[in-house]
Image (spheres, rainbow, N blue to C red):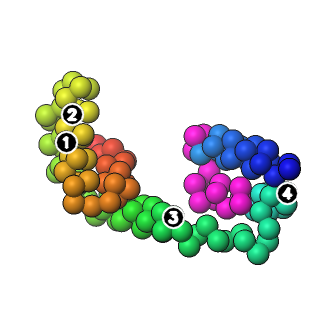
Amino acid sequence: MIEPFVIIIILLIAMVFFIWGRFRYDVVALLALMLATLMGAIPCKHIYDGLSNLAVITVACVMIISQSITRSGVLNIVIEKINQVSYYSVIHILVLAVITAIFSAFMNNVGALGLLSLPPLKS
């Protein structure tokens, strides 16, 4: 009966650490999983069951691809063009929404989000 409350508390603590950004996301997530297991909210035999979920695999792959694209420098030209066009925040949001719509028409929405959540161009 206490497991739901333990999970909620662990998720809230993890969310604070995610927002804070001091520690890597994977470390925080694994620590939250370990804490939930130690508290008895997750049975030991089911610790890694969630990692086989297709959504988790998709998000992990999108993060890897997004980081690869960022480090390659391929999107620097596109980001510069978007920054030139979007002087106002409304135009910037509109441009990003149109790009997201185009990406989402041809690929998974999680993939489109991953591509558009790349870090800003460093000048």
Q: Is residue 82 above or below residue 86?
A: below
Residues under numbered marks 1 and 2 in contact, where contact means CB atoms less than 8 Å apart: yes
Q: Residue furthest bottom?
A: 45
Boundaries of the magenta span: 19-33
At label 4, which amino acid type do we have?
A: Met
Give the CA distance from mark 3 to mark 4: 23 Å
Q: Residue 85 lies in what quarter of the image? A: top left
Q: Which residue is mark 4?
A: 39
Amino acid beneath label 2: Leu
* Mark found first going from the N terminus, 1 or 3: 3
Q: Secondary structure at mark 4?
A: loop
Residue 56: which numbered mark, if any? 3
- Badge 2 element: helix
Q: Which residue position is annotated with label 2?
A: 94
- Looking at the rendered structure, the kind of residue marked 1 is Val
User: CA gap, disc 1 to disc 3?
Assistant: 26 Å
| Disc marking residue 98 | 1
Looking at marks 2 and 3 on the same chain, the residue that comes earlier in the sequence is marked by 3
